[in-house]
Amino acid sequence: MKGVRLQRDCEDAYLNDPTSLVKLLNHVLHLHVFAHDVPRCRVLYDRAMEGMKRRGPDNGFLLFNYAIFQVGWVLGGRVVWGEGGSSLRRNNAALLARLLARH
């Protein structure tokens, strides 16, 4: 129930406190995973990365999710799991699998 509430309220929480990295990451993850709003994700992931660079140290949660976003959405469109897809998509899926295997 807590996860459902978090996803339901993440946009309002972020808009009420836009300087919170945690609230930004919850919101962008919701946009990435559930809403598939790629243009907004790009902007918010860039904002989160810039904030992380300014504040330090590296945030593993942000870096992991940003890598998945970059491989899955930006570099070759949506990753197609279990289907033929283009060779670019298959290569992206393989790269994503290697990234996930490291964690």
Image (cartoon, grey):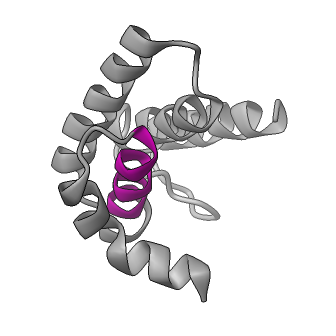
Q: Quadrant of the N terminus?
A: bottom right
| Depicted 69 relative to depicted 1: above or below | above
Q: Residue at x 27, y 46 (%)?
A: 41
Count the labels in the image: 0
With respect to residue 63, does 82 lie above or below?
below
- What's the residue at 83%, 37% (across, down)? 101
Residue at the bottom extreme of this rendering: 1
Predominant secondary structure, magenta span: helix
Which segment is the magenta one?
21-32
Residue 34 percent location from the top left of the image: 39, 70
**Residue located 35% across and 31% down the image:** 48
Q: Is residue 102 magenta?
A: no
Asked if residue 27 lies in the magenta stretch, the reply is yes
Which percent across, then down, holds residue 79?
Answer: 48, 51
| Side (left or right) of 28 relative to 96 | left
Q: Is residue 59 left or right of residue 21?
A: right
Q: Answer with left or right where residue 76 lies relative to residue 63.
A: left
- Relative to 26, residue 41 above or below: above
- The image position of residue 70, as x and y in percent, is 42, 33
Residues 46 and 93: in front is: 46
x then y, percent, for residue 16: 20, 58
Position of the C terminus by quadrant: top right
